[in-house]
């Protein structure tokens, strides 16, 4: 009996965390991965977090970036830039077992500007497709300095 319990415990410990976590946890893990990958200045890994038909309304873009290639172009200057992102606050809204909206505030910083935080706000629709969580929609804009 003890061997069965030990074996069962071992099997459970080897399961991926995303297999046990709920949709909000899985979506938040993608958002955390997005911030870490952005801060690592890795364009290709960042683009891979988006669904092929994703829409990005970038913080500094006057256009809507639709699809993988447009999102890659938006982030083309990221490698070697020393840019970083830190998530400050978030809320998660589970729409279904396969769709979660994560929204909140994050700070961007640029090494070339002395790493002064640039407060921004974001919303991401994170969806599960073929067992993988991906960003389907991402909106980011500067955060207002004053409260109304």
Image: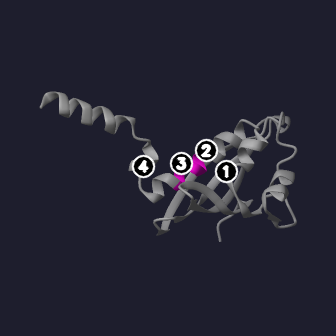
Measured Cα–Cα span from mark 3 to mark 4 = 12 Å
SS for tag 2?
Answer: helix
Question: How many C-alpha atoms fall within 10 Å of the one at disc 1: few (<14), some, or many (≥20)?
Answer: many
Q: Are marks 2 and 1 in contact (CB under 8 Å)?
A: yes
Where in the figure is residue 39, as x and y percent of width and height?
71, 39
Q: Earlier in the sequence, mark 3 or mark 4?
A: 4
Compared across the picture, whether 76 is left or right of 141 comes to: right
10 inside magenta stretch: no
Residue at which label 4 appears: 19
Where in the figure is residue 17, as x and y percent of width and height?
43, 43
Measured Cα–Cα span from mark 2 to mark 1 = 8 Å
Q: How is the image coloured?
A: one colour
Residue at which label 3 appears: 29
Q: Earlier in the sequence, mark 2 or mark 1?
A: 2
Q: Residue at x 41, y 51 (%)?
A: 21
Q: Residue at x 83, y 37 (%)?
A: 79
SS for tag 3?
Answer: helix
Residue 35, quarter of the rendered image: top right
Question: How many C-alpha atoms fall within 10 Å of the one at disc 3: few (<14), some, or many (≥20)?
Answer: some
């Amino acid at each position: 009996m003890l061997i069965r319990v030990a074996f069962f415990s071992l099997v459970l410990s080897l399961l991926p965390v995303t297999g046990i976590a709920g949709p909000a946890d899985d979506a938040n893990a993608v958002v955390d991965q997005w911030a870490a990958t952005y801060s690592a200045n890795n364009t290709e890994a960042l683009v891979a977090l988006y669904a092929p038909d994703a829409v990005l309304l970038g913080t500094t873009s006057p256009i809507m970036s639709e699809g993988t290639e447009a999102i890659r172009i938006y982030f083309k200057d990221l490698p070697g830039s020393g840019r970083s992102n830190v998530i400050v606050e978030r809320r998660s809204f589970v729409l279904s077992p396969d769709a979660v909206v994560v929204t909140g505030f994050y700070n961007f910083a640029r090494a070339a500007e002395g790493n002064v935080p640039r407060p921004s706000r974001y919303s991401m629709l994170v969806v599960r497709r073929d067992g993988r969580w991906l960003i389907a929609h991402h909106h980011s804009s500067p955060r207002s300095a004053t409260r109304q």
